[in-house]
Image (cartoon, rainbow, N blue to C red):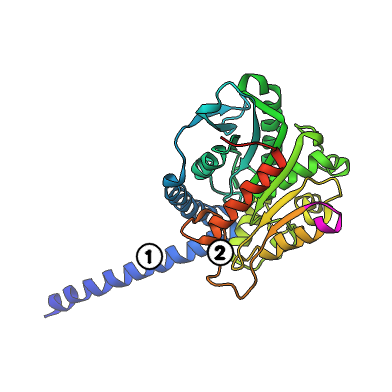
């Protein structure tokens, strides 16, 4: 009888052991996210990589025929992350084309140039060379490294314009989400001596050659980011800046309070269900206050369906198709390309 009772307690002890192990793992996980941004950043990266691949694949049917892509062009031989792709119409081979440099999003912790490859090909069909650029991600690398990398990419394009058949005197910078913020920083470096000095950088391109900027759903206000109570916002700030309370010198991240009348004409859009919407609207207002031409595509709060973050890539939505048409019109105006 004693032996049977002892045997009966073994499954119970095993169950308790499993429960204690699970509780320990949960506790360790909770502790890990308190002492390091890495666990949360890697989870965000996994989710974003899946979402980016799906969004790009969904646009494959929208890509016109006859687009050539030159992949894996290295813009800095000393930097393993310094890669770009160049998309252009085959029918315009041998011609120096106006240039769109598009910077991908991903919350500074995820994403790649491949996520926007088909969108870039769609833009290229109107007669442009569309360059998609990679940069180093956080938390492995921190601010302001991506800004320096992307500025080197612009320098590379300018230095190799003839070989790459690029008309760098007709340039537009574009980006989505984190890429919009980075594109805006590059535009500000090119057009504001004060800001370039604050960043300790010289622009890779002439302000006279920068014809416009296209910005979708960017985090354009560092103050709003650092005060974000969300798990996602806290993770991004911690990963990108190395602290949940970035030091004062990181205030160069904020675009809204630094724009000047020299900032390029801007197309800007964001979904009405995007938590970053107030930041795009604030930038549009700041630019208009400086007299900068702004083409803003915003949707009123009651608009349905609510348009979430990166709505412009979901071509099942008429609003995304409208945003693409407006983007194309802005590019035609700024780059004076006649199309194919």
Density class for disc 1 (Cα within 10 Å; few <14, some 14-19, many ≥20) is few
Labels 2, 1: front one? 2
Image position, residue 144 (x, y; %): 71, 43
Outermost residue toward the right in this view: 194
Q: Which residue is mark 2?
A: 308
Q: Secondary structure at mark 2?
A: loop
Q: Please give the name of the residue rendered at 86% of the width and 50% of the height, measured from the top-left corner.
A: 260
Looking at this view, is 52 or 80 the one in front?
A: 52
Checking the image for residue 21, the label placed there is 1
- Quadrant of residue 125 within the rendered picture: top right
Image position, residue 105 (x, y; %): 59, 49
In the image, is 252 to the left or to the right of 311? right
Count of marks overlaid on the render: 2
Looking at this view, is 50 or 261 the one in front?
A: 261
Outermost residue toward the top in this view: 163
Q: Secondary structure at mark 1?
A: helix
In the image, is 162 to the left or to the right of 12? right
- Quadrant of residue 7 within the rendered picture: bottom left
Residue 141 sits above or below residue 204 on the image: below
Q: Which residues are magenta?
A: 287-293
Q: Quadrant of the N terminus?
A: bottom left
Checking the image for residue 239, the label placed there is none
């Amino acid at each position: 009888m004693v032996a049977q009772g002892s045997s009966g307690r073994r499954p119970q002890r095993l169950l308790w052991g499993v429960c204690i192990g699970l509780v320990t793992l949960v506790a360790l996980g909770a502790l890990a996210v308190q002492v390091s941004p890495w666990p949360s950043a890697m989870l965000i990266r996994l989710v974003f990589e899946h979402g980016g691949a799906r969004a790009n694949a969904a646009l494959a049917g929208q890509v016109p025929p006859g687009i050539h892509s030159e992949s894996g062009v290295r813009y800095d031989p000393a930097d393993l992350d310094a890669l770009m792709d160049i998309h252009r119409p085959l029918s315009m081979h041998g011609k120096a084309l106006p240039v769109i440099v598009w910077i991908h999003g991903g919350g500074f912790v995820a994403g790649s140039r491949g996520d926007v490859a088909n969108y870039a090909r769609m833009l290229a069909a109107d007669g442009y060379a569309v360059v998609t650029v990679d940069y180093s991600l956080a938390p492995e690398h921190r601010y302001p490294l991506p800004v320096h990398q992307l500025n080197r990419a612009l320098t590379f394009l300018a230095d190799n314009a003839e070989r790459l058949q690029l008309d760098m005197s007709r340039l537009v910078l574009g980006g989505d989400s984190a890429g919009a913020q980075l594109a805006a920083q590059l535009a500000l470096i090119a057009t504001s001596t004060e800001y370039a000095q604050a960043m300790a950088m010289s622009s890779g391109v002439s302000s006279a050659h920068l014809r416009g900027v296209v910005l979708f759903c960017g985090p354009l206000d560092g103050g709003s980011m650092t005060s974000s109570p969300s798990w996602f916002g806290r993770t991004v700030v911690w990963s990108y800046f190395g602290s949940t309370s970035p030091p004062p010198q990181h205030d160069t991240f904020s675009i809204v309070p630094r724009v000047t009348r020299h900032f390029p004409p801007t197309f800007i859009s964001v979904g009405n269900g995007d938590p970053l919407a107030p930041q795009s609207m604030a930038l549009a207002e700041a630019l208009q206050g400086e007299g900068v031409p702004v083409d803003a595509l915003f949707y009123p709060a009651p608009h349905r369906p609510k348009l979430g973050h990166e709505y412009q890539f979901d071509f099942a939505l008429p609003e995304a198709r409208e945003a693409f048409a407006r983007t194309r019109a802005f590019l035609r105006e700024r780059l004076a390309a006649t199309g194919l």
